[in-house]
């Protein structure tokens, strides 16, 4: 019998015959490949909603049992589960809150009739989370354009969708608000080179002057930047961020140069992850392969070959972050931590 951990104890997960032919991992991967604008947390939420549509579960217990088991299957299937875990946790919290609301007949939603209303609503509005996530990106762009001043130079890196949207909207005139005239220094992360160049091409198409530099030139270029703007895969419970490798070093350089370091991130990326340091993320990235063998020596059979993660990430602590530009407004890391406590506990 499969088990999942909850509050440090093992709970049994019952098999659900309705889902024998349903593969939530394939569904999750297909959602991401079909919609390049979809974030990992939202893809996880949509995959869980699809799982709900495949089952005949009729009670709250059966449904929560199902969601926990499917969430665990997703977490085990990817090497870096942090971002999607924030999505599955958020969905479980949303489901619990929905079940606490009174139904149309005034009774508890957990009653059979009212519970089915909630389940059907979720299935009918499966794409609602995705559309709201894209709206959040636009909302952040409206808020963030105030931080893009004429003649400023912004340093960024990676292929963050929300950063790309923010800078793209800043380069446009919106009603009576004139477009900003600014330059961008884009640090190209090799692991996300394709995404980075897509953002660069979109900005240049809008007339924004963009210079691309390798990561080794970040310190050299920092003196030319007015602000540093990055995205995040996940926002941690203490107001830090998990983002593509190289973000932490940009934050350190920004602190050394006394530059503002802004993070643009949607609220659905907020979650309960609380790393203590770079090596407390909950999964191995295998960045180091220490050995002293000579090239002609045979590998020892018991050695496990190291396979570095394809998209490495690092952790930026909250003390290096000036502010978050979120769909909930401009927040300090402390504000973010309070919101996560209110949202998830």
Image (spheres, grey):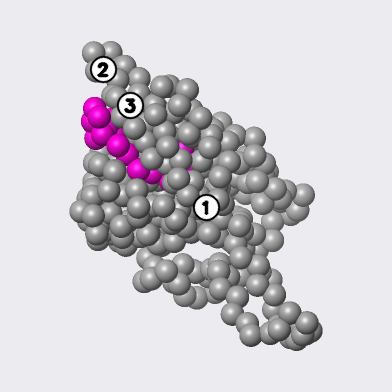
Q: What is the secondary structure assignment of the residue under circle 3?
A: helix
Name the quarter where the C terminus is drawn: bottom left
Q: Position of residue 123 (x, y in %)?
A: 57, 36
Q: Position of residue 115 (x, y in %)?
A: 50, 43
The quarter holding residue 328 reads: top left
The quarter holding residue 293 reads: bottom right
Q: Residue at x 25, y 57 (%)?
A: 255
Name the quarter where the N terminus is drawn: bottom right
In the picture, the disc for residue 170 is 3
Which of the pair 290/195 is nearer the observer? 290
Would residue 245 be visible to someone looking at this image? yes
Q: CA distance from mark 3 to mark 2?
A: 9 Å
Which of the pair 237/196 is nearer the observer? 196
To which residue does mark 2 refer? Answer: 178
In primary-sequence order, the first of circles 3 and 2 is 3
Verify whether residue 324 appears in magenta. no
């Amino acid at each position: 019998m499969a088990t999942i951990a909850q509050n440090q104890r093992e709970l049994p997960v019952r098999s659900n015959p309705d889902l024998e032919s349903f593969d939530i991992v394939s569904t999750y991967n297909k959602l991401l490949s079909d919609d390049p604008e979809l974030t990992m947390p939202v893809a996880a939420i949509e995959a869980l909603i699809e799982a709900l549509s495949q089952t005949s579960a009729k009670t709250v217990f059966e449904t929560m049992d199902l969601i926990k088991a499917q969430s665990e299957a997703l977490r085990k299937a990817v090497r870096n589960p942090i971002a999607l875990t924030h999505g599955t946790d958020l969905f479980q919290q949303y489901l619990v809150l929905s079940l606490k609301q009174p139904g149309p007949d005034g009774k508890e939603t957990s009653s059979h009739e009212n519970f089915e209303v909630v389940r059907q609503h979720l299935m009918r509005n499966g794409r609602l989370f995705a559309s709201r996530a894209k709206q959040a990106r636009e909302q952040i762009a409206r808020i963030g354009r105030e931080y893009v001043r004429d003649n400023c130079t912004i340093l960024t890196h990676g292929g963050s969708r929300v950063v790309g949207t923010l800078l793209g909207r800043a380069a446009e005139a919106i009603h009576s608000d004139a477009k900003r005239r600014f330059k961008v220094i884009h640090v190209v992360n090799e692991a996300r080179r394709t995404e980075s160049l897509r953002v660069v091409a979109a900005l240049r198409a809008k007339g924004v002057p963009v210079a691309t530099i390798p990561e080794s030139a970040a310190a050299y270029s920092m003196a030319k930047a007015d602000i540093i703007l990055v995205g995040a895969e996940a926002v941690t419970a203490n107001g830090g961020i998990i983002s593509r490798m190289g973000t932490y070093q940009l934050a350190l350089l920004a602190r050394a140069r006394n530059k503002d370091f802004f993070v643009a991130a949607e609220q659905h990326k907020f979650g309960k992850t609380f790393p203590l340091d770079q090596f407390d993320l909950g999964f191995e990235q295998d960045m180091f392969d220490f050995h002293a063998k000579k090239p002609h020596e045979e590998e020892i059979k018991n050695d496990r070959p190291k396979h570095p993660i394809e998209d490495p990430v690092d952790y930026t602590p909250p003390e290096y972050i000036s502010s978050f530009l979120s769909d909930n407004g401009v927040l300090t890391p402390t504000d973010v931590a309070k919101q996560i406590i209110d949202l998830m506990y």
